[in-house]
Amino acid sequence: MISVRGLKKHYRVHKRPPGLKAALKSLFKREYTTVPAVDGIDFEIKPGERVGFLGPNGAGKTTTLKVLAGLLYPSEGEVRVDGHVPQKRDVEFLKKIMLVMGQKQQLLWDLPPADTFELNRAIYDVPKDEMKKRVDSLIELLQIGDVVNKPTRQLSLGERMKCELAAALVHGPKVLFLDEPTIGLDVSMQVVMRDFIRTYNQQFGATLILTSHYMDDVAALCPRVIVIDKGRLSYDGGLAELVQRVRPEKRVAFRLSAPVPLAQLEPLGKVVKNDAAEAVLQVPMDQVNAVVGKALASLPVKDLTVENPPLEEVMSELFSRSRAAEGKAA
Amino acid sequence: MTRTLRALPTLLRIGLAEAIAYRAEMLVWVLSTTMPFVMWVMWNAVSQAAPVVGQSGKAYGAGAFGAYFLSIFMVRQIVASWASWEMNFEVRQGTLAMRLLRPIHPIISYAMGHVAALPLRFFIAAPCAVALVLTSSDTLPKDWRIWALWVPCMVGAWLVAFLSNIAVGTLCFFMESSLKVMEVWLVCLMVFSGYLIPLDLFPPVLRAVADVLPFRYQIGLPVEVMTGHYTVAEAARLIGIQWAWAFALLVIALASWRAGVKRFQAFGG
């Protein structure tokens, strides 16, 4: 479905230090620098896959997404989406895709979302009866029946994002690019959006590419992740495998019936938390069984859970290692 | 193309709904375009002080200036374009991305927004049309063929206005902002279109310059046609030149767009 070979996108940026002198100098002589936003990445995505693009700010995730959507022209490399070259922006290509950006909108500001749905129906040439069925289904799934006839400017952020997603799906795209779709939404709204996106993928087999700084989005939606850092691909594979590779440990959380001194916990593993009600240890994967056995024998344990370390920590460690490796190489 | 044509009624309906949502702003904008009435008063005073005769030999009195500037106001309302401002805003904010993602050329969608606002603009221009007929009917052409030519002349004027906006607007792909370029364009429009001074009153050298620029074909020509300056043959010839300008501006706008959109950086996440 999606094929990327040797993709590079370099920006030529005017570089100017602050201050009046620099501003005046730049009137006559400008200095430019080349920023390699994407610096040679390759990957393939099959139809129906859900893939997360992860990386720190400025890694090149959104740039890659925009190249795939045909908004940006690559500096080098070859990109194909369902056989189309995105930059040609063929009508058939544009009818198959949609890019939803959390910080941009396509809803008409002064008109109700229902008008934007109708506008998209006309532009994408969706038959009216098919449109009605699809919009009714979207309205039900996203619970936006009360708001589709109110002017967009009067909607809350959460309502607007749900309507934005509905507008993006009116034409039934086969490929959905989601750039931070849950940004700024409260926790319950994030859950609604994730559930909806997963259901859409499962019902219609749409290919999904998501960028998000919320690891809960990635954990809930993306069995496969592509990690981009400084424009280069540093990992492409299963999320679970990534976690094992970066942090091959488990978090064992004990709910306690009485406080336990630190000295009693330290021999079992790295203590992440210790309070009157709970103790959390970080333990190498191959030692989990032994540690659980010892803890049950020696600690007042009421309950326990074994989990992967938080994805935020895993990613943070991954990026730190990448920075450190870069520093060494330099 | 068929798909775009099928989408037009909906595009126009939604565009009109958007234009009506901005009705208060539109009235304020109309107030800012009342310079023709100021010029009418000024030229009236000039014609009372001394005879005003154009290069064509036509004498301009109160009636002629009244007909001329009422027509200027009407034509200006109908052919107005704001595409350059829209484009600059959308490129700088990155929101042009949303237009580029849709399977309809952005220039067509800008055009439909303009066409959709025409009913409101006709509504604003209508009182001037009524005033023109009531006060200056003797200066208006009696030959129906002139009025038949006036329709494509107005369409040509709209195209020149819109496409010049698009062409100047696309410069924002190559520079920080093309709004200042648009302001310079507007100053030239004010002078060389006949908006402030009838071109017939220009000195010959300036008139010759005005004749080779596109500005007069945006406002001056439709006004001159509807105020009886030309014979049918002369009007047809000038309308031919006007449409040649529209075609040239279309070619320039499309070429500039194609080159510019490759540089679009879709700012923002």
Image (cartoon, coloured by chain):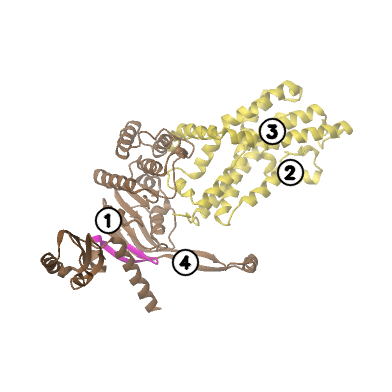
Chain colours: A brown, B yellow
Residue placed most toward the observer, A166 or A46: A166
Q: Marks 1 and 3: in contact by CB < 8 Å?
A: no
Query: Which amino acid is tagged 4?
Result: Val
Q: Are marks 1 and 4 on the same chain?
A: yes
Helix, strand or loop for disc 1: helix
Residue hosting label 1:
A219
Residue placed most toward the observer, B81 or A53: A53
Q: Residue at x 28, y 63 (%)?
A: A236
Q: Marks 2 and 1: in contact by CB < 8 Å?
A: no
Q: Quadrant of the C terminus of chain B?
A: bottom left
Does residue B263 belong to the magenta stretch? Answer: no
Residue placed most toward the observer, B89 or A120: B89
- How many other residues sit within 10 Å of disc 4, few (<14), some (14-19) or many (≥20)? some
**Chain where mark 4 sits:** A
Helix, strand or loop for disc 4: strand
Q: Quadrant of residue A166?
A: top left
Q: Is residue A322 left or right of residue B188?
A: left
Name the chief secondary structure element in magenta: strand
Residue hosting label 4:
A35
Q: Which of labels 4 and 3 is toward the front?
A: 4
Q: Find the distance from the CA under tag 4 to the CA under tag 3.
A: 50 Å
Query: Which amino acid is tagged 3?
Result: Phe
Work out whether mark 2 precedes mark 3 in sequence or the reverse, and give the earlier one.
3
- How many other residues sit within 10 Å of disc 1, few (<14), some (14-19) or many (≥20)? some
Q: Is residue A66 left or right of residue B125?
A: left
